């Protein structure tokens, strides 16, 4: 069982930056694939980024690639999402997710993840 708690959301102007953090607790966190997803009002939850168990491999949605960076610190049991050049379309509730990593597959599907945080709101204003 893994418990996930997101923090760092808020209101930021377009073009600005924001860093989200996800604190994990529970067993064998180090062996988990960690992901960030987001859900905008009226839209389905979508994949944003993922990082493998040792931080050596990352995967990004095309819409955020080159603007967002995912990283993890296994000593602190945290995974961060550094967001820059934020756009109005980035406004959403951002969720941290985890699944045990049993292969090199960097899953982007919601159904592949077993554990979810409660979400943190990110609002980008003009």
Image (spheres, rainbow, N blue to C red):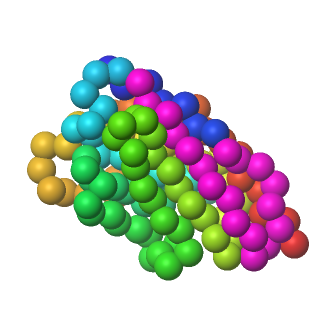
Left or right: residue 112 versus residue 77 is: left
Q: Residue furthest left?
A: 103
Left or right: residue 74 versus residue 20 is: left
Taking the spot 28% from the left edge, 22% from the top edge, the residue there is 27
113 is within the stretch colored magenta: no
Can you give x and y, in whole percent of width and height, for residue 110 in the image? 39, 47
Taking the spot 37% from the left edge, 56% from the top edge, the residue there is 50
Q: Which residues are magenta?
A: 8-25
Q: Would you identify the image quadrant in which residue 16 lies?
A: bottom right
23 is within the stretch colored magenta: yes
Q: Give the quarter of the figure containing the N terminus.
A: top left
Q: Residue furthest right?
A: 126
Please give the count of numbered marks on the rendered protein.
Answer: 0
Left or right: residue 21 versus residue 51 is: right
Can you give x and y, in whole percent of width and height, for residue 34 in the image? 36, 46
Can you give x and y, in whole percent of width and height, for residue 74 in the image? 34, 40
Q: Give the quarter of the figure containing the C terminus.
A: bottom right
> Is residue 37 shown above or below 77?
below
Can you give x and y, in whole percent of width and height, for residue 120 in the image? 66, 42
Taking the spot 40% from the left edge, 49% from the top edge, the residue there is 72
> Is residue 110 shown above or below 66?
above
Is residue 44 shown to the viewer in this render? no
Is residue 93 shown to the viewer in this render? yes
Q: Would you identify the image quadrant in which residue 26 lies?
A: top left
Left or right: residue 6 versus residue 15 is: left
Magenta region, main secondary structure: strand
Taking the spot 39% from the left edge, 45% from the top edge, the residue there is 73
Pick the front one: 117 or 15: 15
């Amino acid at each position: 069982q893994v418990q996930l708690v997101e923090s760092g959301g808020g209101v930021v102007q377009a073009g600005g930056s924001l860093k989200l953090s996800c604190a994990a607790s529970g067993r064998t966190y180090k062996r988990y694939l960690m992901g960030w997803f987001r859900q905008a009002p009226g839209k389905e939850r979508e994949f944003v980024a993922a990082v493998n168990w040792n931080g050596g491999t990352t995967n990004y949605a095309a819409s955020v690639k080159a603007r967002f960076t995912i990283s993890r610190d296994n000593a602190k049991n945290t995974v961060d999402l550094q967001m820059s050049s934020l756009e109005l379309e980035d406004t959403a509730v951002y969720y941290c997710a985890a699944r045990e990593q049993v292969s090199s597959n960097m899953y982007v599907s919601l159904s592949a993840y077993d554990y979810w945080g409660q979400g943190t709101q990110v609002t980008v204003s003009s």
